[in-house]
Image (cartoon, grey):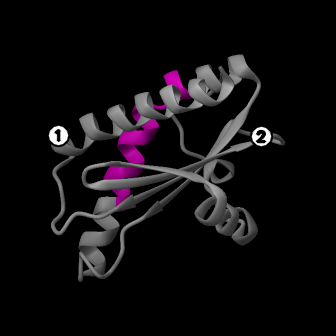
Amino acid sequence: MSCAFTFSKNERLCDRALISVLFTKGRTFYESPFKVFWADVRDHAAKPVQLLISVPRRNLKKAVVRNLMKRRIREAWRKNKLTFYSHLEKQGKGCNVAIVFLGKQALDYADLEPIIIVILQRLIQENEKIAG
């Protein structure tokens, strides 16, 4: 995989139809302070995973803080995604993922990265349950 530690445009989930399917028919789990929605995708042309990150205004009022949280989540995902990506490539599948931050205050990167790693491991486990 070339450019393994990047987060490019085609890795972002932007298609409204796919997003609505993900939130209505996708599977979910909680990993405090996150709620994770995910769904298998059969036609994954460019990347095995497309990611959506959401930080609602209800919990973090200031846009500066919301954007900071999105940047931190994106960075933690970018640095730790390889095991999940390689797992999906072995299975020949794709996955759409939405990570929704439910916390009442912003987390430091040092606190956030281990949670993202747990989310990635949990996605691998959930994916194996479906496949097996």
Between the residue at mark 1 and the residue at mark 2, the CA separation in whole angstroms equals: 31 Å
Q: Magenta residues?
A: 70-84
Check disc 2 and give the amino acid type. Answer: Ala
N-terminal label among 1 and 2 = 2
Residue at position x 69%, y 63% in the image: 21
Residue at position x 39%, y 38% in the image: 119
Q: Give how far across and how far down residue 86 sits, in percent.
A: 60, 20
Check disc 1 and give the amino acid type. Answer: Ala
> How many dots with numbers?
2
In the image, residue 73 lies in the stretch drawn in magenta: yes
Residue sitting nearer the eye, 130 or 35: 130
The tag on residue 46 is 2
In the image, residue 48 lies in the stretch drawn in magenta: no
The tag on residue 110 is 1
Dominant SS in magenta: helix
**On the rendered structure, is 124 left or right of 22?**
left
Q: Estimate how packed mark 2 is, as few (under 14), some (14 to 19) or many (20 or more) residues with alpha carbons within 10 Å.
A: few
Against 2, residue 38 (above or below) is below
